[in-house]
Amino acid sequence: PSRSDITYFGAGPAALPTDVLEAASKALLDYNGTGLGIAEHSHRSELATNIINEAKADLANYLGFSPEQYEVIFMQAGGTGEFAASVYNLVGAWVSRQHAALKKELGDDEEAILAALRKKVETELKVDYIVTGGWSLKAYQEAQRLLGPEYVNLVADARTINGGKFGKIPDESTWKLSKDAAYVYFCDNETVDGVEFPSFPSILTPDANGNGPIVVADMSSNILSRRIPVNNHSLIFFGAQKNLGSTGVTVAILKKNFLPPHTVQPSPPLLRKLGLPIPPIVLQYEIIAKNNSLYNTLSIFDVYVAGQVLKKLLSTYPDKVDGQQAVAEKKASLIYGALEAHPEVYRIVPDKAVRSKMNICFRVTKNGDTDETEKAFLKAATALGLTGLKGHRSVGGIRASNYNSIPLEGAEKLAKVIDDFAKSS
Ligand code: PLP
């Protein structure tokens, strides 16, 4: 088949807009008449810096956050690397705050400060995780692995209210938040389980004076698809490979309070004395930010693709992310609507209140047989050019990833296949 015959519903790497790829393929051979391709130019060149700076500005413009308050950092760690980076950097920031407070209290007595700091680490250091699916579970486990389980608090585990499976979000009144956690972590959209927070958790919302918990969100699979209250977060991270661009670049949006001069990460000797992990330098936001994401070799090609996607979004939607959100909601409701019309055949996996608009997970059963029916469904869809619909290997079933690059007609085609398949014998 040719590209125009296919609507690809894969969960990531996801499809990219064809015109972006056409521009990128030209840029790979010759970037802007320089006689050298974009992947060949030095990351130290002025054009590389321009690509980075434009992508940063366009991201802030599209999502509506202030570049004065938030730094955008391009990294190569993947979402998985950010599970670790969030631990290192925000625990480091916690240590740095405690150290400054103790210095005020105890003056220059370094030994007394260290003893008091050790005690604080032992008795007060906590990081909080809300586990609502496979990815927040992995992040929680990474924090346990790096810090030691005694420092990691499980605020809520969605499986406990749903027969051991993901698919719901526990009521906030049951969440067990720590007092003054170094941060509270959640995954806004669980790609494998199809669970998305309907809105920012109210229990984590800052008060009228702007005081609230330090919040970290993984938005790998729903960034750029909906308006988010960036100001409620200290850190938002996402891999590019779903809504932003090609695989190979990861973005962190970090509140500048967590960077120098406001926060200086503790030195390795201090961390060693406290028994806390020392971050690899490529995961230190402070270092990457200071070098405008060019501490080491960055794939400028991937940043370029992300930048082109942002430019396309900005030119398509005059009201920026709100415009894209309206389209995402329309596409999701078409697909969910088609599934709901045939409850005897389709079972939508997550609870209605927390259904993801990006990853639509469902099971298909006819005559009491799910496995064979799902195979037949995939076959019917593939025959019409709708591909990438197989669920994640850990949960099975069908998953339609309804990312930004899926056009409205793609969602219409899928809705039609869902309807036709249910009616066929
Ligand atoms: N977080 C979420 C929500 C994801 O969907 C994924 C990957 O699909 C990850 C994290 C892990 O990302 P990576 O494979 O880039 O490490």
Image (spheres, rainbow, N blue to C red):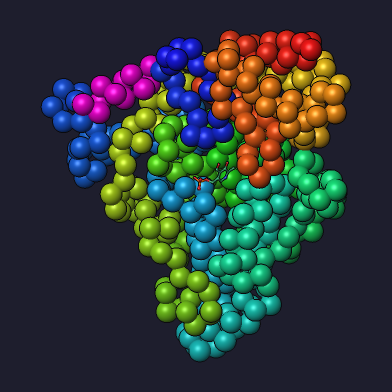
Asked whether 129 falls inside the magenta stretch, the response is: no
Note whether residue 277 is visible: yes
Q: Where does residue 310 sit, x and y in percent of width and height?
A: 43, 26
64 over 251 or under it: above or below: above
Q: Where does residue 137 sit, x and y in percent of width and height?
A: 66, 53
The residue under the point 73% across, 60% down is 154
Q: Where does residue 11 sit, x and y in percent of width and height?
A: 56, 33
- Return the residue nearer the eye: 400 or 402: 400
Q: Report whether 114 appears left or right of 331.
A: left
Taking the image in four quarters, ligand 1 sits in the one at top right
Q: How many marks?
A: 0
347 over 163 or under it: above or below: above
Q: Report whether 405 appears left or right of 425.
A: left
The residue under the point 73% across, 43% down is 201
236 over 301 or under it: above or below: below
Residue segment shown in magenta: 19-29
In terms of secondary structure, what is the magenta stretch mainly? helix
Note whether residue 255 is visible: no
Which picture quadrant has residue 226?
top right
- Return the residue nearer the eye: 235 or 370: 370
- Return the residue nearer the eye: 320 or 396: 396
Which picture quadrant has residue 121?
bottom right
- Return the residue nearer the eye: 122 or 348: 348
The residue under the point 40% across, 42% down is 248
- Check the image and name the residue furthest to the left: 35
Q: Where does residue 257 sit, x and y in percent of width and height?
A: 50, 54
Location of the N terminus (image quadrant): top left
The residue under the point 38% across, 25% down is 308
Location of the C terminus (image quadrant): top right
